[in-house]
Amino acid sequence: MTAKPGSLAALPVGGSAVVCRVRGDRAVVRRLLEVGLVPGTKVTMRRIAPLGDPIELRVRNFALSIRRSEALGIDIE
Amino acid sequence: MTPLAPVVLVAGNPNSGKSTLFNALTGSRARVANYPGVTVDRISAPLTTKDGRVIELVDLPGTYSLSARSREEQIAVDALLGRGLPAPRAVVVAVDAAALGRALFLVIEILATGVPVVIALNMSDEAARDGIAIDVARLAAMTGAEVVRTVATRGEGIAALAAAIARAAARPASDAPFLDRPDALNLDIAELEAAILEERVLDRHGAARAWATWLLLSLDDQGGDDLLGIPPRLRTLTLAIRDRAAAAGRNVDLEIISSSYRRVDTLVDAVVRRSPGTSRSLTDRLDSVLTHRFAGGVVFAVVMMLVFQALFSWSEPAIAFVESRVAGAQALVTAALPPGPLTDLLVDGVIAGVGNVVVFVPQIGLLFLFIGLLEDSGYLARVAFVIDRLMRSVGLHGRAFVPMLSGFSCAVPAVMATRTIESRTDRLLTMLVLPLMSCSARLPVYVLVTATVLAPGARAGVFSAGAVLLFAMYMLSVVAALAAAAVLRRTVLKGPGATLVLELPPYRLPSVRVLFFNVWQRVRSFLIDAGTLILALTIVLWALLSYPRAPAGAGPGEELRQSFAGRLGHAIEPAIAPLGFDWRIGVGIIGAFTAREVFVSTLAIVFDIESADPVNEPLRDALRAATWPDGRRLMTPLTGVSLMVFFVLACQCMSTIAVVRRESGTWRWPIFMFAYMTALAYGASLFVYQVGSRLGLGIG
């Protein structure tokens, strides 16, 4: 799965960015928004799981893991 | 406790220490019941205030938000607004003080209902260690809530929390709007709020406003939710408002959640002070090993082996103890009572049935002890993190790994362990496929069959033929389980919701008290809910295998052969003959429904063998000598393989059915599971036997 630039999935480990949009299936988007990935929130890419997926983010001072497929729908700037 | 005691809810995010807090507040006086209509435990306990009033404290399931798509998730909002349940006087929200920026979202949603709130800034020691200081007075002033600092694991702040609960419960609920929402959204909410008040679903403005917001966020545009108690008019209106907003280019979900988070951010900016330059935390250092590409894999394998070892070997003495006690009780009753149908019912129905229930307790207890340890220490989330990639390839959630692994030991505790999976679809999928994992009760069947059909010392290349067959059966079970998951995910259980949104909580020391309370609660709910069903099924099966009675003087074999089960065996013979099974094997399969290993003892009775254990030679000899009426040998190697394949795939276990009934909340899923597994087993055995016969393998 290749991530296009501007997507959270393309953020290198250790990198930080700000969420600007969350796209995808409504239920998935709602869940991501509710755990704090609302536009304007700072995220840091912390770690990638041993098998390459999922990824670990730092958001709002807690560690959140989501799949790459979900991260692809999160636009950052 | 009087039934009229005012209710105070305890809410909180998962991993906020909510259960520990609840325990610290109430001691060990908790009662467990069920929320109506769903399989979610409602844990409550009395709390006596300083001035002697009694409050009923109710533990809500851990959640990040109030929005819902399933009935299980709907409990939170129904309990808060008092729909079908007593309306709460106040709500305690357990908050992880170190992650206020996320935890306050739930607080805000609850504050918006107008119910008085007590914020318990839990684990405030951890926050302090991380250099996080919180201005308690300011947080209280800005939210109107009582705010108390607690460290539940050490009992700190608990007395102050109890006092704050008493104060909050004495306050009236508020109807003033709490949040700044965009104007268009405010109009939408007001329209729906008015309709809710008109429909008399709720009578308080604050509650109706909160419910209107909840409806907008929760109802599925295509009606794909299964939420209850929503009048059709409100459902239609909600969807019309959502459509209207979408047509105007607005995203209602985003507006609601963003405006709540804006309030969270304002609060955090005002009350949280972070000292710069805090050192790398312990969790971070642990994670760099435990989720490391290589080291992480090794630790993972070791921990999982340990769980496996415990379930397989450590539970053995306890199971043997239960079995010996049951046998002892049976002998005692047989000796004490005159022989007759009532004694038989008592000995072979009731006592055996109780034994069939209690025998699961050691494995359930051990599995939940381990799961509790892994969950509360934070490692269970890492298990999901490490293994999700593999599980996802067949549509399973990373959290399904531990239940699937425990399926090798026994499906009953494994099905119960699926509760650690949040989404109902993911949970159902896991519990429907994990009975395909080859459990330890199948082993005696494999052993009997391989020892019967294989010549001693038979080899396949460098390996013993028995070992190869056994390995093949385990492989078949794993492949079948994963394939079934992949198929069910694309058919019966398709749709969205297959997400992984997983918090990786900081590593913590588990509280022994909470751990044992949870183990006891699981065991207790198994004994009461699934246990009664297993007991009833044991008695039914006993009756099938014992009635109608044979004439006096008939041996046990004769009795079984002419019982309902014996006749049923004859009746199904035309159906199972193409698999290579005669009616005697059919009776064994019927008997095995009690528990798979009973196949061995049932066959022994059919063949008039006195003692029956898997290494018992007479039964093997009898099976080897058994023939069809036309003189063909019954137990050829091909029949053996066909029989083993049948046992790998068939749902030959009433306890599994009982526990899936209990955990899924309906009969629909266990019936579906029984049907698909039986069809799978029949088809596979038919394939093995027919193709094998055509290829001339059956002569052996």
Image (tube, grey):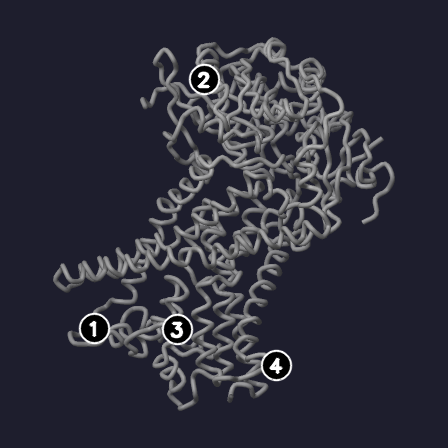
For disc 2, the marked residue is B159
Q: Which of label 3 and label 1 is nearer to you? A: 3
| Chain of the residue under label 2 | B
Q: Which of label 4 and label 3 is nearer to you? A: 4
Q: Amino acid at mark 4?
A: Val
Q: Amino acid at mark 3?
A: Pro
CA distance separating discs 4 and 3 = 26 Å
State the image coordinates of residue A70 (x, y, percent, origin top left). 73, 41
Which residue is located at x 59 percent, y 11 percent? B140
Residue B440 relative to residue B506: left or right = left
State the image coordinates of residue B350 (x, y, percent, origin top left). 26, 55
Q: Amino acid at mark 1?
A: Ala
For disc 1, the marked residue is B550
How crowded is the residue under tag 2: few (<14 C-alpha within 10 Å), some, or many (20+)?
A: some
Q: Are marks 4 and 2 on the same chain?
A: yes
CA distance separating discs 3 and 1 = 28 Å
Regarding residue B258, the answer to whether it shows in the image is yes
Q: Which mark is residue B462?
A: 4
In primary-sequence order, the first of circles 1 and 4 is 4
Q: Residue furthest left?
A: B338
Tell me: residue A16, above or below residue B628: above
In primary-sequence order, the first of circles 4 and 3 is 4
Q: Which of label 1 and label 2 is nearer to you? A: 2
Q: Amino acid at mark 2?
A: Ala
Q: Are marks 1 and 2 in contact (CB under 8 Å)?
A: no
For disc 3, the marked residue is B614
CA distance separating discs 1 and 2 = 69 Å
